[in-house]
Image (cartoon, helix red, strand yellow):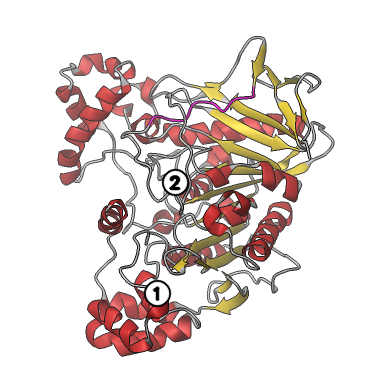
Amino acid sequence: MVKEFRYDDVPVLETTGGKLKGYFYNGEYIFKGVPYAEADRFRMPRPAKWEGVKDACSYGFVCPLMKEETPAAELMVPHRYWPQNEHCQNLNIWTKALDDEKKMPVVVWLHGGGYFAGSSIEQVSYDGFNMCMNGDVVVVSVNHRLNILGYLDLSPFGEKYKNSGNAGHADMVAALKWIHDNIALFGGDPENVTIFGQSGGGMKVADLMQIADADGLFQKGLIMSGVGDKNIMPSCTGNGRAIVTEILKELSIPENQVEKLETIPYYELVTAYTKVSPAVAAKGEYIGGCPLVNDYFKGNPLDYGFRDHAFEIPVMVGSVFGEFSFAPASYNKNELDEGQMKEIIREVYGEHTDEMADLFKETYPGKKLTDLLLVDRVMRQPSKRLAKLHAKGKKAKAYLYDFTLEFPYQHNKIAWHCSDIPFFFHNTELVEVCQIPDVAEKLEKQIFGAFMAFAKTGKPECAELPSWEEVTPDVEPTMIFDRKCEIRYNFDDKLFEKIDSILPPFNLMEMMANDENAIQH
């Protein structure tokens, strides 16, 4: 059946920045590459303004990356690549109605990639069409400055660079301000906005809860595989005098001409930064790359505590079973008996193997013993701590989930980082590896239903799921998303306690390097 497309009769909208022209496709109005702000390099964003009618039918530029991407593991996380430009402050909108009386809930996607990479359309599953269509919500995805463009502090070199160490976060605040002031034109309710993100995007959700300038611009938050602690990503403190001084030396620029850094070609700046930053970091000095703790940004709540206002924001927090275990196994777990699996486990746990096997069976009944080696040590424990910390505020509720699905890939590979995103977006149909007969469609309905209920009411109540209780300072009800969804209470505390007593502290960078080598070879 031919789908309906319209352009000529789609009305021009008068936004705070200027006039916009989008298009209609198959039941939705779509606006792409909408400017929400503009900024000079290392400066705070200012509201975008344009003359005439802005065509909003093409995605906007994404932030330049510090190194060229190499397509890999596309079956696991299919990607899209797009033209880059540091003038990347734009957003995309999917909506069913251009009617300021509709007041539909608004969901705003903050992409992953840490604070240094990614884009609003980077993954195929980021597309907002199906979420809008099936959830009756207005979907917005945001691009903003990253890496040294978004997170390099030049404030010691002049007032005009004030807060440049948080330029990327200031972009997001500017985007939320634009959404608040304009989303009613797109049928959205500016007083019912949920921000959500995965990985670095999840970190951005928690970060925005720690920024007073964002207060009132969103009411709920979903953090997906995005809670890090100081063992994973230490907070950025101090200032940029040391790193910027070394960059200037490397580029043979006198300090009194620091403004030349505003116009030097991006990749020359990247090359200089990459060369000098390891030595500066080795001295314990600030090198940027993540938001700077200061009067503007109050820091990771696990390190600095939540601001009072953050306790008023309902949150969903979750992670997936395997997170960063991208590398394929050297064995087929489905062909191994228990004894063979224990021998593989023994390579890691030695004399503790039998005890760990019994504990793993208790924690994750039905999973293969070898999956013990893939249990996430990156996000699950910090996610639990964040939810309990939020619960101590006793103002808004926090909900925990654990995505533990196995996929029909590499002998029933356990859920990896990003594998839950298609289910939250209602986009499993776009991702080949998600095609699991009699499983994917049902689980997508459950996960998507819970998220849409949360976006509308602050509670993830879904008819297809068991009752989902909120976290308390003492009890951690966790919704298990799998072939069978169920609530379990503090179910993995003993497992993590034992793992941490046996294994050395987790090193994410080492694991990612090993996985990258395994994937490429």
Compared across the picture, whether 1 is left or right of 279 comes to right
Q: Distance between the residues labelled 1 and 2?
A: 38 Å
Helix, strand or loop: magenta stretch: loop
- Residue 63 location in percent, x, y? 43, 30
Looking at the picture, does residue 51 appear above or below residue 32? Answer: above
- Of residue 312 and residue 378, the one placed in the foreground of this image is 378
Examine the image and state in which quarter residue 257 appears: top left
Q: Quadrant of residue 94?
A: top right
- Picture residue at 40% right of the left edge, 86% below the top: 359
Which dot, 1 or 2, sits closer to the camera? 1
Q: Give the range drawn in magenta.
A: 56-64
59 is within the stretch colored magenta: yes
Residue where numbered disc 1 is placed: 371
Q: Mark 2 points at which residue?
A: 298
- The image position of residue 30, as x and y in percent, is 69, 31
Question: Is residue 307 magenta-colored?
Answer: no
Which quarter shows the N terminus?
Answer: top right
* Residue 351 drawn at (x, y percent): 23, 87
Side (left or right) of 221 relative to 230: right
Q: What residue type is labelled 2?
A: Lys
Q: What residue type is labelled 1?
A: Asp
